């Protein structure tokens, strides 16, 4: 039937054609009975002429018509007139979203207004079992009054069937467009749609993420010259964060969009309602002033970064002890000055405090006889009493609310476990063997016990776990897992109703709340680590470097009001509040200088003597200089040490953190990591020019870049889709490409890697299949041309470096407080394409005996010496007596 303007279909008078798509032609029409404008969508012949498909269409269209939401275009009816089948819908006057988004994105207020409405509409449809499958700006209208309306809900599946494809294929939209054109629909597909896999509501979550990305930045996250290249981008590329594209956006918005765009549907939001809630909460935090628009708070660093920061300001104790802290409450009245005094004062390291239920005793960690062990001391004074005597390092003691036992973490023979022991004396027992690639002190939070002392929260590789102390039965409270998202340090509220924990997304951390019985977590603060409840359960104390130094803060949960508790150079952590309101915390520092040890006999000599830390020493190719990083000026910068004269000079001068220096083989350039443009990226300094330049825009992991032996490539470490990837780029920034892209998803705490003798071989660390067992961690050598591999060493290791002559590899082993240097001898391959083989067992070169530890630097050019950072931690436990 030929349809023309002015024609009637039943009581609908056609006015003008307003659109055309895979589901047919859309007309503006007048409902002559109700005297209103409507939109008519006339079905294509392929659907109308097939009775079975027509019935299915009518049934599903009726389901869509049942939707009643202010942000979804209403479907009125499914009709038929003289063999013409059509749908009648609400007529929306306005513009499509694609025509309203400026090239630099929407204003933030307008973004949140439209984004929340869009997510709410999708959530309403999903609750009725309806999936859109074709969300894109062209299917989203904004009325003249500013109201958002989503078109075509639930009809995308019908369009696919109209093209004769199976229901779960979305490639139909690509076949209808000429080659070379960037397809809007393809650019908004989920990866599972692009691969023709079965889809559900999570495909809409991904499409929402693409639309949100474009609304926030004005750019699509996935682009290409043809439909195939766009599909390839959807399947393989990780777009830059919206906060990288548009730095003025709030950091958490980047996390929200990134979660929507996860390639794995399991890692996206579980529902559009959760997405809507996060958007509304973020908007509320911005409107209330709790959250700044620019990401000014420093990111939470990895273990190595924490150690680097530790060297700044060893006089922090004096600063905190004599500072007066004011909290501006209503009427700007100053609060009572906080009274801080030390509980411990002996030489060495004291940390991880925990109160007895009545507050009269405290358990903590102290280095003793070469190990970190747990002591108990009366808070009114007296000598500490040794509690744990078994070999191995012990950490994170946590007193049960009933006072009968203390849970703690222990590392023994490559395994990390949580143990229980009576608080005075008795036999300890293993409760659970847990993960080994997270810091021991992060496994148990300040208050991990349930109020009835029956259950314990702990960090698992895949989220927060809960274990019944009597039966050993385990369950999950959260389930994220992987190196990209990590939940840890979960603390139970005093009333037992809520759990606060820290969630890490790559290098950023924030505090989240979740009901103790389970459910969806919600963001408390886009910053902070090591949370601890106050007895009234109205506030959470935490550590933050938001002002540049790690200090203690508190947040009032209901209002979001922040209060800074300690000031100064910082390194204040591990806060825990007793029921009587006294707050204990750990303040620490570290003396870290450069040393060199002879590999043959272990003899050592000191290279530097500074009050601030020096790390990552690397020999120049001629052996005359060492490049390293130091924070002595207040900013972490690259320095150079002349080994003959002892003279030192600064090479970089930016206020941002910079480190991880690596010499080029000709000694003329230094590659390093810099945060001068807001994230860890690869830079190169030409020593003859003195002006560094950035090589790539990619965000690096904290491992140092590595020049290839011939100087033609610089390798570096990135995180992609939850996997560690080794990439390489030419020194001029050209030809960035993957070198090894299949490192285990579990990750190896930013594990080291490096070239072995030539551009053909790389040695890297690979996670064990069982992440609870560090004894399975593998050091692997790979021939990049043939793909052949060999395992050189299996067991705990970190910070691996390789001798220039190819005859040895050095690494650090044992726990954080007993980290020593070990050397494994290698037999170089006979053939150019061969692989080295290990000779014997690793030999320990240093013996820290628990009083200090090392962080590796580099081998001398003649492979006879190893430079490293010699680190002696100091720490005391302080108490805020009048904290309330």
Image (spheres, rainbow, N blue to C red):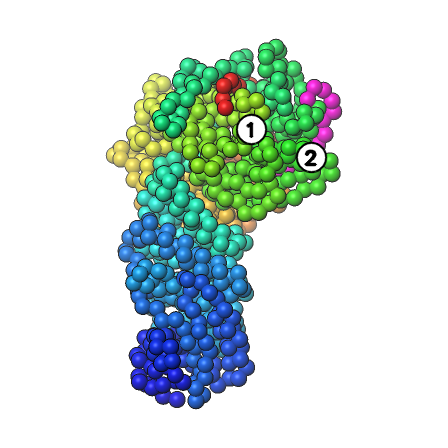
| Image position, residue 242 (x, y; %) | 37, 49
Q: Nearer the viewer, residue 476 or 679?
A: 476
Q: Is residue 586 magenta?
A: no
In the current view of this chain or complex, which residue is farthest to the front? 34
Image height of 406 relative to 558, above or below: above
Discs 2, 1 touching: Cβ within 8 Å: no
> To which quarter of the image does residue 398 belong?
top right
Disc assigned to residue 454: 2
Q: Across the whole image, how many numbered discs are drawn on residues?
A: 2
Question: Which residue is rendered at x = 46% and y = 65% of the image?
Answer: 68
> To which quarter of the image does residue 4 belong?
bottom left
Q: Nearer the viewer, residue 440 or 330?
A: 330
Image height of 262 relative to 550, above or below: below
| Image position, residue 696 (x, y; %) | 35, 45
Question: Which residue is rendered at x = 67% and y = 42% of the image?
Answer: 474
**Residue segment shown in magenta:** 423-438
> Which of the two discs, 2 and 1, sits closer to the camera?
1
Judging by the rendered image, the residue that carries numbered circle 1 is 535
Image height of 269 relative to 670, above or below: below
Question: Which residue is rendered at x = 27% and y = 33% of the image?
Answer: 690
Instruction: Label the magenta part by its dominant secondary structure.
Output: loop
**C-alpha span from label 2 to label 1:** 19 Å
In the current view of this chain or complex, which residue is farthest to the left? 689
- Dot 2 crowding, Cα within 10 Å, few <14, some 14–19, many 20+: some
- Dot 1 crowding, Cα within 10 Å, few <14, some 14–19, many 20+: some
SS at badge 1: loop
| Image position, residue 1 (x, y; %) | 39, 89
| Image position, residue 399 (x, y; %) | 64, 26
């Amino acid at each position: 039937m030929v349809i023309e303007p002015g024609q009637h279909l039943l009581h609908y008078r056609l006015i003008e054609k307003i659109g055309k798509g895979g589901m047919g032609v859309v007309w503006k029409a007048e409902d002559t009975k109700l005297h209103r404008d409507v939109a008519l969508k006339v079905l294509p012949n392929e659907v109308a002429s097939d009775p079975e498909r027509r019935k299915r269409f009518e049934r599903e269209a009726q389901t869509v018509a049942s939707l009643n939401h202010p942000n979804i275009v209403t479907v009125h009816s499914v009709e038929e007139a003289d063999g013409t089948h059509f749908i009648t819908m609400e007529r929306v006057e306005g513009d499509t979203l694609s025509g309203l988004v400026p090239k630099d994105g929407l204003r933030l207020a307008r973004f949140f207004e439209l984004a929340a409405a869009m997510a709410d509409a999708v959530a309403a449809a999903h609750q009725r079992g309806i999936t859109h499958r074709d969300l894109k700006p062209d299917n989203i209208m904004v009325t003249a009054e500013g109201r958002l309306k989503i078109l075509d809900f639930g009809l995308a599946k019908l369009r696919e069937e109209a093209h004769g494809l199976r229901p779960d294929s979305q490639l139909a939209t690509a076949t209808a467009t000429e080659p070379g054109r960037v397809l809007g629909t393809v650019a908004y597909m989920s990866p599972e749609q692009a691969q023709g896999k079965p889809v559900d509501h999570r495909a809409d979550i991904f499409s929402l993420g693409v639309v949100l990305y474009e609304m926030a930045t004005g750019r699509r996250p996935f682009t290409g010259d043809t439909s195939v290249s766009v599909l390839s981008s959807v399947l393989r590329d990780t777009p830059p964060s919206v906060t990288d594209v548009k730095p003025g956006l709030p950091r958490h918005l980047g996390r929200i969009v990134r979660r929507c765009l996860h390639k794995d549907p399991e890692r996206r939001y579980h529902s559009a309602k959760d997405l809507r809630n996060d958007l509304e909460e973020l908007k509320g935090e911005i409107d209330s002033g709790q959250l700044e628009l620019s990401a000014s708070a420093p990111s939470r660093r990895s273990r190595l970064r924490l150690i680097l920061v530790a060297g700044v300001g060893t006089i922090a104790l004096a600063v905190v002890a004599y500072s007066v802290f004011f909290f501006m409450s209503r009427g700007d009245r100053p609060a009572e000055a906080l009274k801080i005094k030390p509980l411990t004062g002996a030489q060495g390291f004291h940390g991880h405090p925990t109160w007895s239920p009545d507050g009269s005793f405290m358990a903590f960690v102290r280095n003793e006889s070469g190990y970190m062990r747990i002591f108990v001391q009366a808070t009114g004074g007296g000598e500490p009493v040794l509690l744990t005597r078994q070999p191995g390092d012990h950490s994170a003691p946590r007193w049960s609310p009933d006072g009968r036992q203390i849970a703690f973490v222990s590392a023994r023979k490559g395994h990390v476990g949580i143990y229980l022991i009576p608080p005075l004396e008795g036999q300890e027992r293993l409760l659970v063997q847990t993960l080994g690639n997270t810091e021991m002190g992060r496994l148990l939070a300040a208050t991990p016990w349930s109020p009835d002392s029956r259950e314990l929260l702990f960090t698992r590789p895949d989220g927060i776990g809960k274990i019944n102390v009597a039966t050993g039965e385990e369950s999950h409270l959260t389930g994220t897992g992987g190196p990209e998202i990590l939940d840890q340090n979960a603390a139970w509220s005093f009333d037992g109703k809520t759990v606060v924990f820290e969630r890490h997304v790559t290098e950023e951390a924030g505090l989240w709340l979740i009901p103790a019985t389970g459910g969806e977590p919600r963001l408390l603060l886009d910053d902070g680590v090591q949370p601890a409840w106050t007895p009234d359960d109205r506030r959470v104390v935490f550590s933050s470097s938001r002002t540049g130094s790690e200090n203690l803060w508190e947040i009032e949960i209901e209002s979001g009001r922040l209060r800074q508790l300690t000031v100064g150079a910082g390194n204040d952590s591990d806060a825990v509040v007793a029921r009587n309101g006294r707050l204990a915390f750990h303040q620490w520092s570290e003396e870290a200088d450069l040393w060199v040890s002879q590999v043959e006999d272990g003899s050592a000599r000191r290279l530097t003597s500074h009050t601030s830390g020096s790390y990552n020493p690397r020999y120049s190719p001629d052996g005359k200089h060492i490049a390293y990083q130091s924070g002595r000026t207040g900013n972490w910068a690259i320095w150079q040490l002349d080994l003959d004269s002892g003279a030192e000079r600064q090479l970089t001068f930016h206020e941002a953190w910079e480190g991880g220096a690596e010499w080029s083989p000709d000694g003329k350039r230094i590659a390093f990591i810099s945060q001068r443009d807001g994230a860890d990226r690869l830079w190169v300094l030409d020593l003859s020019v003195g002006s560094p330049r950035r090589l790539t825009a990619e965000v690096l992991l904290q491992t140092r870049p590595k020049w290839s032996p011939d100087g033609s490539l610089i390798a570096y470490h990135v995180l992609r889709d939850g996997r560690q990837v080794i990439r390489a780029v030419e020194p001029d920034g050209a030809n960035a490409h993957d070198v090894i892209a299949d490192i285990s998803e579990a990750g190896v705490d930013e594990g080291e890697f490096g070239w072995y003798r030539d551009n053909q071989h790389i040695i890297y660390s690979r996670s064990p299949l069982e992440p609870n067992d560090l004894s399975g961690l593998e050091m692997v050598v790979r021939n990049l041309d043939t793909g052949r591999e060999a395992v050189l060493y299996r067991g705990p290791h970190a910070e691996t470096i390789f001798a220039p002559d190819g005859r040895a590899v050095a690494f650090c082993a044992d726990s954080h407080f007993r980290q020593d240097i070990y050397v494994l001898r290698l037999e170089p391959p006979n053939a150019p394409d061969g692989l080295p083989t290990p000779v014997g067992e690793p030999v320990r070169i240093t013996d820290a005996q628990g009083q200090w530890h090392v962080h590796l630097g580099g081998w001398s050019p003649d492979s006879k010496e190893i430079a490293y950072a010699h680190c002696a931690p100091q720490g005391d436990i302080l108490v805020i007596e009048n904290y309330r």
